[in-house]
Amino acid sequence: MKHSDLSLKATRLVVWALFGVFAVLLVTAPWVFRWYCGLGRTFSTVRYTALLATFYACSPAAAITLFHLNKFLRLVGEDKGFTRTAVKSLRILSWTCFAAGLLALPLCFFVYGAFPIPAAGLFLWLLLRVVKNSFEKATDLQEENDLTV
């Protein structure tokens, strides 16, 4: 087994583990966040509500992101990384990161130190746009090569 295959399998395993953690957190978030907010003793009910609302607002984007990340990794594992389907998954990944970044932005007004959360989402949006554009160009070249005899 090549090192890249092992790395790909490990990454997919992590994505599946995140699916599980995400599913559990969807159900237990009110209790987990209440416990977390109680640790600092500086969280108010408004901050707890903002944290919970942001989590649930970003949840659809997170689910779509995990789904398409797994799909993209599967395509790469099948040597179909430079296909329109893979580019579409990268496009969706980038826009879900953008959505999560925007949806998490109001949290900064309620929770001190929350700025890295939307900043990370928006940074990943930009990074994934560059990767998507690179894969799109490579896909164009691949399709052009396939037509050459």
Image: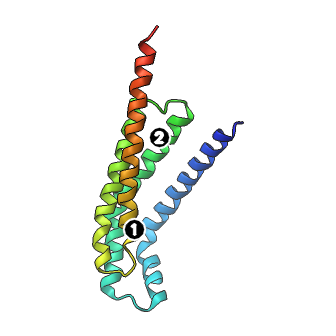
**Numbered mark located on residue 25 in the image:** none
Tell me the quarter of the picture where residue 3 sits: top right
Residue 5 horizontal/vertical position (percent): 64, 39
Single out the residue that lies furthest toward the top.
149
Q: Which amino acid, mark 2? A: Phe
| Residue farthest right in this picture | 1
Image position, residue 67 (x, y; %): 44, 47
Look at the picture and state if 50 lies above or below 138.
below
Residue 132 is situated, as x and y percent measured from the top left of the image, at: 39, 41
Give coordinates of residue 86: x percent, y percent.
43, 36
Between the residue at mark 2 and the residue at mark 1, the CA separation in whole angstroms equals 24 Å
Q: In this rendering, would 24 be left or right of 93?
A: right
Q: Which residue is mark 2?
A: 72
Residue 130 drawn above or below residue 137:
below
Secondary structure, mark 2, is helix
Is 53 rendered above or below residue 45?
above
As drawn, 129 above or below 63: above
Q: Residue at x 40, y 62 (%)?
A: 120
Q: Nearer the viewer, mark 2 or mark 1?
A: 1
Left or right of residue 2: residue 45: left
Viewer-side residue, 141 vs 2: 141
Identity, as a three-letter code, of the amino acid under mark 1:
Ile
State the residue position of label 1.
117
- For the point 39% across and 44% down, the residue is 130
